[in-house]
Image: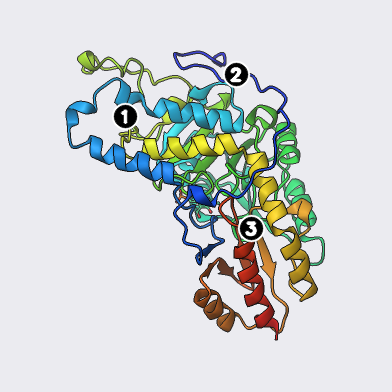
Amino acid sequence: MRPEGDGTLGTVRAAAPPPERSPLSCRREDFHLPGDYHYLNCAYMGPLPRVAEEAGIAAIRAKRMPTDIVPPDAFWETDGLRERFARLVNAPNPRRVAIQPGVSYAVATAARNLPVSAGDSIVLTHEQFPGNVYAWRRLAAERGAELRAVGPGDGPGRGRRWNERLLEAIDARTAVVSVPNVHWTDGTRFDLEALAERCRDVDAALVLDATQSVGALPIDVTRLRPDVLVSATYKWLLGPYTLALTYFGPRFDDGVPLEETWIARERSDDFQNLVDYQDAYAPCAVRYDMAERSNFFLAPIAAAALDMILEWSPERIQAYCRSLTADFLTEVGELGYSVEDEAWRGAHLFGLRMPASVELGPLRDRLAERRVFASLRGSALRLSPNVYNDPADLAVLHEVLVEAVR
Ligand SMILES: Cc1ncc(COP(=O)(O)O)c(C=O)c1O
């Protein structure tokens, strides 16, 4: 295992106790969102902040003159993304962060490198996002392993029960647990501390798809010690599509990447001598970078958005979402709408279940007419607010929900 902090990148300073910070106020002015556009669907896609849009336009213009895009700086700009993401998830060594094109890619990298044998189990949650399913299906079929997709079961106390069932499904034959932090359909929250401890007890690898939470909910890899933690950047990281940032723990230090790129090799910064071929991969997670990882268009957009999120902080974003929705949830609760217990859901992502009298078709139409954007998933309305939402957004949604129960 390599020592943490090796390599040439700067290391992230040890996390100091967070200073008391004032609550976040609405950041709508940092986005181009019209006043009558009630966007409550960050779980689908985050809007681009103004600064990120400007960074993207400047980046595109830079390619007018290729001589402005020269090694090493332009090719190593993605190291800045590693540093920002490492700070966000409290990973001491930025080299533990790989630049990848999506969650499916990160999960496929994990599946390629984890030892799974016949009779082992791979534990997932029921109806998990498919990007964190297909690689495990293939691996289970190839190796004769069992895929256990754990559901919530029936009855009250759904979130708590789902968590209990998940822990019970992990046993001595479990090789991998690959789960989200909050479920993409309804925001059910999984207790990562308990899961990480259980995985350590049985020596199972823990792969976390934190795409629906990193940025809006604090997460700390130093405490949790997962083996993999990935987030696409186009949702709660308010960045571009086709980019994911993936933390890989020491278990992956000697692994094999999906692609045999030249850029993720030792000495790939020596442009004069690239045909002095190197067998050795770059250290830690850098070996898992995608081909052409130095994406001059996407990297500046992601960096600008990450800077905003680091300044706002996931703690304050989560608190903002909680206080924005508290009264609304009490009021719609009185109309018969229900939501998961606060301890078992995100404040930034949750499913509102309908009273029996509500017809989903007319509700969908009315939401569209009033320009309220949220996803209807089964019989629940998935709501995913963020810092650009204000009480006016929830007031319009409230009006639609009042009409729907009449
Ligand atoms: C939980 C979760 N993971 C991953 C993704 C995206 O996966 P990929 O990057 O493989 O397209 C989504 C998209 O909705 C998601 O909700």
**Image coords of residue 77 (percent x, y):** 37, 27
Q: Nearer the viewer, mark 3 or mark 2?
A: 2
Residue annotated with mark 2: 13
- Considering the image in quadrants, where does the N terminus appear? top right
Which circle's residue, 3 or 2, is located before the other in the chain?
2
Q: Are marks 3 and 1 in contact (CB under 8 Å)?
A: no
Q: Nearer the viewer, mark 2 or mark 1?
A: 2
Residue annotated with mark 3: 126
Task: Report the Cα–Cα distance between label 3 and label 1.
Answer: 35 Å
Q: Residue at x 58, y 49 (%)?
A: 212
Is residue 153 at all visible to an observer of this figure? no
**Image coords of residue 27 (percent x, y):** 56, 48
Q: Secondary structure at mark 3?
A: loop
Asked whether 116 or 100 is in front, the reply is: 100
In the image: residue 352, left or right of residue 108: right
Q: Amino acid at mark 3?
A: His
Q: Quadrant of residue 68?
A: top left
Residue annotated with mark 1: 261
Q: Amino acid at mark 1?
A: Thr
Q: Report the disc number at residue 90.
A: none
Task: Report the Cα–Cα distance between label 3 and label 2.
Answer: 38 Å
